[in-house]
Amino acid sequence: MLDNCRNARERWGGVSELIDRWLKERQQLIVHYCDLTGADAGIGSEALKTGFDQLCEVLLDYVSAGHFEIYEQLIQEAKEFDDGGLELAARVYPRIERTTETALAFNDLAEQAGLDEKDSAPLFESLSKLGESLESRFEMEDFLIEHLHNVHADEVMSSA
């Protein structure tokens, strides 16, 4: 019994650490996004390219970690606790998937776009749409973390 309690704490404690690292990555994403939205017209195409490259790298890492690490752990936790979390996730994940499509489309555009004044306008317009999509995604992710993970934190700790 003690081993089961210890295993639960290790398993879900690891989820907390994973989520913490992922949320730090989210902060990096927001910083890169804000750096680009605050860039003035005279920044130069090379600096803009570097900014967009950095944003896209963190964006893809963040989205991938969500889909291939975080969400899987949250689903596993929902299965273990069997308290309606799977149904909740089934309703929210398709909406998150749409934001993933927006992120991937932005990345594709950023890879192909020229960064002169004429060609960069669609990219900055897409950057604005990406920001709206990310804001929505962050809200949904926070909701899932709260309802699929944090809600069980006391149970995990009390069984340890």
Image (spheres, helix red, strand yellow):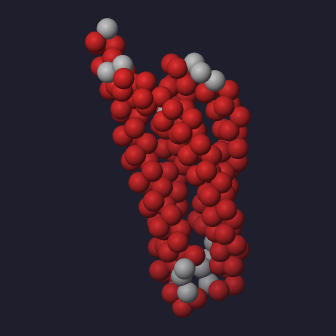
From the viewer's side, name the closer residue of 65 and 83.
Answer: 83
Does 137 sit left or right of 154 as displayed?
Answer: right
Q: Which residue occupies 67% across, 62% down?
A: 132
- In the displayed structure, does residue 64 sit left or right of residue 6? right
Asked whether the viewer can see residue 62, the reply is yes
Residue at 47%, 67% in the rendered image: 31
In front of the other: 61 or 26: 26
- Residue 44 position in % (x across, y down): 51, 86
Which of the two residues, 85 or 152, is positioned nearer the viewer here? 152
| Image coordinates for residue 123, horizontal then vertical, percent | 66, 72
Res. 53 in view: no
Q: Please identify the residue farthest to the top as the structure is shown.
A: 1
> Where does the C terminus fall, quadrant-wise?
top left
Residue 97: % across, % down:
67, 44
Q: Quadrant of residue 141?
A: top right
Where does residue 151 sit, x and y in percent of width and height?
Answer: 51, 32
- Residue 75, relative to residue 27: is it above or below? above
Residue furthest bottom as drawn: 42
- Name which residue lies at 43% across and 54% down: 25
Q: Quadrant of the N terminus?
A: top left
Count the labels in the image: 0
Please, is residue 147 above or below residue 121 in the view?
Answer: above
Q: Is residue 59 above or below residue 86?
A: below
Is residue 25 positioned above or below 42 on the image?
above
* Residue positioned 58% across, 65% down in the render: 111
